[in-house]
Amino acid sequence: MARGRLTPEREAELYEAVLDLLREVGYDALTMDAVAARTHSSKATLYRQWGSKPELVAHALRHNKPVSIAEIDTGSLRGDFHELLARSDDCQMEKDSALMRGLAHAVHDNPDLLQALRDLLIEPEMTGLNEVLDRAVRRGEVAPDNPALGLVPHMFIGAFVARPLVEDRPVDQAFLTAYVDAVVLPALGV
């Protein structure tokens, strides 16, 4: 969708409003009418800019992730993962984790949302993570045939899902750093 008519500031306001509404009411109850009312814009503008609710939600989530993992290159895999976590804020991580849990439920009934999330959020993140892991392989930190290479995204998602279920505590920087050091890096032989 062409989004050339909105200023970056206005686009950021719209995205923040969408994420706030998602946190408040969930995906299924989120409507373009509610977004239009919250942002003092018209539904026509929203549909013209994004085409559909799934596209708008996926773009809002993408905008909310300003750091691309592929941009981080400290010279070591441990350093790259630690730098990624250092750029995260515990409060934002807790909000994002709750949001993603809600969306994980919504994708089961909304194939358009799943496709939009895959295209705009999951694939770019997977590509970035694969670049980081490929660099680690080229540096000799990780064996190219290590079976855990293909499971790193699953390990990270598992951490986000499991901690609230197992410990009834949110995921935070300290937990993820310990998880990376105790689970992810050893699985990769680092």
Image (spheres, rainbow, N blue to C red):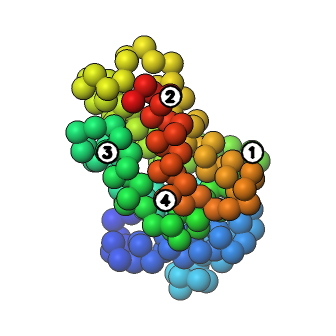
At 47% across and 31% down in the image, what residue appears?
186
Does the residue at mark 4 contact the one at mark 3 (Cβ under 8 Å)?
Answer: no
Could you classify mark 2 by the number of other residues whose Cα lies within 10 Å: few (under 14), some (14-19), or many (20 or more)?
A: some
Mark 4 to mark 2 CA distance (whole Å) = 20 Å
Mark 1 vs mark 3: give the one in front: 3
Pointer 4 residue: 173
Mark 1 to mark 2 CA distance (whole Å) = 30 Å
Q: Which amino acid type corresponds to the residue marked 1 in the rendered image?
A: His
Q: Secondary structure at mark 4?
A: helix
Mark number displayed over residue 108: 1
Q: Which amino acid type corresponds to the residue marked 2 in the rendered image?
A: Ala
Does the residue at mark 1 contact the one at mark 2 (Cβ under 8 Å)?
Answer: no
Q: Which amino acid type corresponds to the residue marked 4 in the rendered image?
A: Gln
Figure quadrant of residue 189? top left
Image location (x, y in percent) of residue 49:
46, 64
Pointer 3 residue: 79
Image location (x, y in percent) of residue 173:
49, 59
